[in-house]
Structures are given as structure tokens and as C-alpha cells.
Amino acid sequence: SAKSMLILLLEGLNTDSKITARITALCGGVNPSYWGQMVAEIQYTVNMIYAVVLAVITVIGIIGAIFIMNDIRLELHYRRKEFGYLRLFGVSKGRIVKIMLYERGFKMAVATVFALVLYFVALLFLKIVYNINGLMPLYSFVGILVLLFAFAAVSVIPPCMRFLKQNVIELIR
């Protein structure tokens, strides 16, 4: 059948002249090696698009990480009196770090829910308008969530600990 011959062609088994002649006839006189070249070119193009998309996502992620760390430092600066008073009333540094982690985790959870809503709206749009099925696998989503919360912990703890090394009087000023 034509389907099995095309499968043989795509697997590189087009050495038999009868198969090649039959596929050439099925393809409207076009040489079967042309289709193999087209498949290779399409795969190369898709791989290049994938690489560009990953590079753009990486750059956006790095810029986002810089902004998040700057936001944490700014938040620490604006809340220095609050932390000073908490230290003055006997709250431990570890407890203050936990407060910051919980607050940052809550902000990230809200942002993740918002991102998921936008993601599924975009999927619905692609399905309705362009009839494209694209769904991120569950293991990728779980991996991204783990990385986000790990980044939250890594980005909160060091600046917070550095900030809390200051004297209580300096924090209150």
C-alpha cells in the first residue's frame, strides 16, 4: 500500500528500484529523495525555531530573576523599620525569614495561578482559531513550579539574612 511504501521511504529503505518507482508514481512524478530532503529541512527549521524560542525564554528568565531579586531588596529596604521593631520585640531572625518566605511564596502562587489561567486561555484560542493542540506536559509544569519555588527560597534567604545582620537601632532609624 502507499502508506507502507511512504513509511519505508521515510525510514531510508528506498533502495529497491520498484519501491522507488512506485513512490515516484504516487508522488506525481517527484523523486522520493526530494521528500526526504524536505523532511530533513523541515526538521532543521523546527529545531532552529525551538532553539531561538529557548534562547528568548532564557533571556526573559534571567531578566525576570534580576527584577525579582531587586524587588526583594527594595521590599527589605522599605520594611526595615518593621523588621527592626520585630527584632526589638524579640522575634528571631529565622522567624522573620520565614515570614518573608511565606509572603514571597504567596505572591508566586498567585502569579502562577494567573499565568495558568492565561496559558489555558491561549490554548483555547489556539484550538478554536487555528485548530492547534498544544499542551504542556504535566512533568514540565511540575518541574517549572519546583524551580520557581526553589528560586523564591534562594532569592529571599541570602538578602534577608544579610539585611538582618544590621543592628536593631540601624533598622529602626
Image: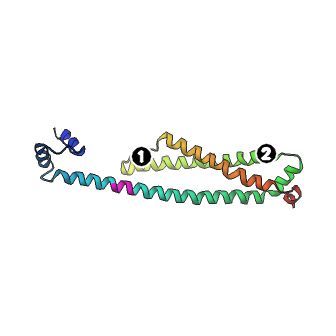
Q: Label 1: state its secondary structure.
A: loop
Q: Is residue 45 above or below residue 131?
A: below
Closer to the camera, 102 or 53? Answer: 53
Q: Residue at the location (80% across, 53% down)?
A: 164
Q: Label 2: state its secondary structure.
A: helix
Residue 28 visible in this rendered orientation of the protein? yes
Name which quarter of the figure residue 19 lies in: top left
Q: Which mark is residue 134?
A: 1
In this image, 83 relative to 16: left or right?
right
Prevailing SS of the magenta stretch: helix
Q: Which mark is residue 147?
A: none
Q: Residue at the location (44% across, 47% down)?
A: 124
Closer to the camera, 172 or 11? Answer: 11
Magenta span covers which residues?
44-48
Q: Residue at the location (57% across, 49% down)?
A: 114
In this image, 54 relative to 80: left or right?
left
Residue 107 visible in this rendered orientation of the protein? no
Q: Quadrant of the C terminus?
A: bottom right
Closer to the camera, 15 or 77? Answer: 15
Q: Which residue is mark 2?
A: 94
Q: Quadrant of the N terminus?
A: top left
Foreground mark, 2 or 1, reads 2
